[in-house]
Image (cartoon, coloured by chain):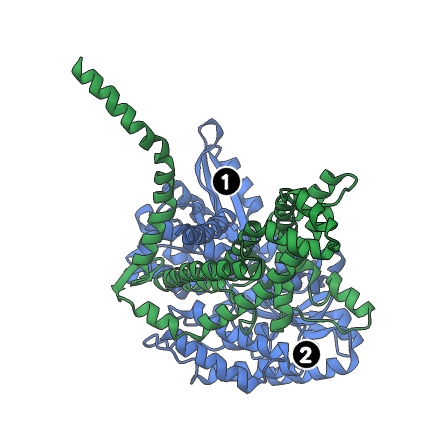
Chain colours: A green, B blue
Amino acid sequence: MRTQVSFARRGREAAPYLFIAPFFVLFATFGLYPLLRTAWLSLHRWDLLAGPVEFTGLANYARLFADPFFYNALANTASIFLVGAVPQLVAALGIAALLDRPLRGRTAWQAVVLLPNVVPVVAVALVFTQLFMRDHGLVARILSALGAGPLDWQAHAWSAHLGVAIMVLWRWTGYHALLYLAAMQSVPRELHEAAALDGASRARSFRSVTLPGIRPTLLFTAVVSTIGGVQLFTEPRLFGGTSTGGNDRQFQTLVMYLHERGFEQLDAGYAATISWVLFALCALVALGNTALVRRLVGRW
Amino acid sequence: MQRAGVGRALVCLVAAALVAAGCGTSGAGGGGRVRLTVATFGEFGYEPLFEEYERAHPEVDVVGRVTDFDTHHRGLITALATGRGAADVVAVEEQYMPRLRRSARRFADLAAFGADRLRERWPRWKWEQGVADGGRVVFALGTDMGSLAMCYRRDLFERAGLPTDRDRVAALWPTWEAYAEVADRFAERVADARFADSAGTVYTAVLNQAEENYFAKADDSFIGDTNPNVRRAFGIAGAIAAKGRTAKVTTFTPEWNVAINRGAFATVTCPAWMLAQIREAGGAAGAGRWDVTAVPGGGGNWGGSYLAVPAQGAHQREAYRLAEWLTAPEQQEELFVRSGILPSEPEVYRDPVVLGHTDPYFGGAPVGALFAASSDRVRPNHRGIRDADVRPVFGRALGRVEDGAQDVAQAWEQAVREAHDLIG
C-alpha cells in the first residue's frame, strides 16, 4: 500500500519534468552537443577525413585573429548586411503601412507579399544568378538596352554585394512586412483617433503612434535579420558558384569562409574555430542591436 | 546558445544537401534485389552500361547519380568523414587521389576481392595511383585518362580568315607562343567571339605538359613559386587573359555551357572526356561546327578518374564486381566508341577499332588517332597531397587578370603569397 502511494506521488512529482523533458533532450542533442563538440574540435588541428592530428590549444584562435581572409569575410558580411537589411526593413515598413489601410482583397495581397519567402532559397538564388549573368542575363540586356555597358556583377565588390543583397531583400521583405502588419493592427485605434483629433498629420501619427506601438516587433525583426545576415551563405555561394566568392574573395561571407576551410581544405579544426567566433559575433550583434533599436524608437 | 546551434545546423544542412546531391544510400531493392548506387561527375557515359549489367545480373539493381565535379567530390569527402551517405561505387578524379590515399582505410581494400590480379590491365603509373601502403592495398581502379587535344570552331576560324583544315590548324600553333599570336590574328577579324574559353583552361593545359607542377616529385615540398613550368604557364595564360582574348567563362559552369551553345569562343583545350561535355552543351545545332586537332606543345594529360568502393557500403563485394566490370577492357572500348571516354588500358587504346574511330559530331575528326595514338606517351603529373588546395589559388589569380582587377605580375605575386600562407 505504502509503496504504491509513494510511487504515485513520485509519479506526480516527476510529471512536470517529463513534460518539459523533450525540449531539453532536443536542445542537448541539437544545440548543446554540437556546440561543445565544435569547441573541442576548435582546440585541435583536425583533418576532416583523417581525424585529430594534434591538440593545439588556442592556436587556431590566434591564427584566425591574424588571418586577413577572416577580416575580409567579416567586412563583406557586414557590407552585404547593411546594403540588404536596412532597405529591406524600411521597405517592409512601407508595405505594412500600405496593407494596414482598408483595402480590397487584403488577404490576397498578404499572400502575394509572403510568396517570395516560401520559394526555396536555392531556387531564388539560381533564378537571380541567371538574371545577373554577365553576358546573357536579363539584367545585362536591360542595361545594354538603356545604353549602359554590360556589367560583370561578380567582378566588383560593390556590384556583387548589391546582387546578393537584392536576393536577400526579395526573399525577406514580405515576411517582415507581414510581421509589422500584425503588430500595427494591434496598436489601439483610439490612439490614432486621439492623434487625429489633436491635428496630427498622417506621417506624424505614424511616427509617434505606430512606430512606438510596434517597437517589440521592430526589435525582433532587427535581431532576426542581423543573425540571418551574419550567417548568410546560400545566396552568395550559389551566386559565384564557389565558396571563395569571386576571384579576389570580394563577396565571400563568414560562413562561406567556414565552408571553404572545413569542407574544401578539410581543416575541420579551423572551421570549428570560425563557427565559434561566428557564434560570439551573433550574440554580440544581437545585444548591440537591441540597444540600438531601443534608443532609436521611443523610450517606453 | 541556440544561434550557434542554428549555425551548426546550417552547415550540417549544407553538408547533408551536398551528400544528398552527390550520393545516395544503398539497400536492398524491390524483390530482394541488391541495389547498388554509382556516384559519378560530369560525363562518364555509364547509363547504358548499367542496363547491360542489370540484364546480365538480374539480382542487381544499379542506380547512377551524376553531379558536377565540385559537388561530387565535396559530397564524397563529407560522406567519408561522417561515415555515411556515400554511394556503393564512387568516382574519384586524379587530383583528389593523393589526399584520399592517405585515408585509404575509408575505402574497401579491393585486393581482398581479387583486384591485385587486375594489375596488368593498366600501365604502371595508372595502377600505382590507385594503391596505398606500398602497393599492398588496392583502393581504386582506373577508368579513363585525359590525353590533350585542341577543339576548335571551324565556322569561327573561317570568319577570321584562318585555315579550317585540322592539319593546317595544328601547323598554326606548334608552340603556345604561336597559339597566342593566332589569338591576336583572330581578334583582329572577329569581334563577337573570343579565341579561348578562359585563361584557366590554357593554363592547365600548359602546366599539365610538365611533369612537376606545384609540388616536388622527390619530397612533395611546395615549389609552385620557383618551378619555371608554373611560371611559364602562368605567363602565357596571363598574357592571353590580359589582352581580353578569353570569353571569361569557367569550365563546366552554366555560363561555359551557354558560351559553347552560342559560339562565344573559338578554341578550348580538350582532353578526351571533354568532347562529351561539348557535345552535350552544343546540342544538335553544334554538330559539324567543332573539330579536333593537336594541342600546342605536343600532347599532355589532363585528368582521368578512378572507381572506389567506400568501406561504409553494405554491399562491398557486389560493388567491387560492378566496378571491376565497368573498368574492364570490353567496357572501356565501348565507352570510347560511344562517348569518347578515353581508355587508360593499353590493350584497349592499341585496339584497331579504337585507333580508327572517328567522331561525326566533331566533323568526323579521327579522335582515335588523335587521343589513343598518343596514349603510350601520357605520363602522370606529380600531384602533391595539397594539390587540390593550391590549384584554385592560381586559377583565381588568372581570374583576377580576366576581371581586369590586376595585371599578370600582381596576380602572380598575390597567388604565390596565398599559396605560401595556405601551405603554412
Q: Position of residue A69 (x, y in %)?
A: 46, 72
Residue, disc 2: B245
Quadrant position of the C terminus of chain B in the picture: bottom left
Residue, disc 1: B62
Residue at figure coordinates x 55%, y 60% from the top left: A237
Q: Element at badge 2? A: loop
What's the distance in space between the residues labelled 2 and 1, CA to CA? Answer: 45 Å
Q: Quadrant of residue A7?
A: top left
Q: Position of residue B421 (x, y in %)?
A: 40, 77
Residue at figure coordinates x 70%, y 60% from the top left: A131
Say what amino acid the circle numbered 1 marks. Val
Residue B308 seen by the camera:
no
Say what amino acid the circle numbered 2 marks. Arg
Residue B246 lies left or right of residue A26; in this view the side is right
Q: Chain of mark 1?
A: B
Residue at figure coordinates x 48%, y 79% from the top left: B415
Q: Residues within 10 Å of mark 1 (few under 14, many from 20)?
A: many
Looking at the rendered structure, which numbered label has been put on residue A290?
A: none
Q: Position of residue B46 (x, y in %)?
A: 55, 48
In this view of the protein, which residue sits in the foreground, B375 or A13?
A13
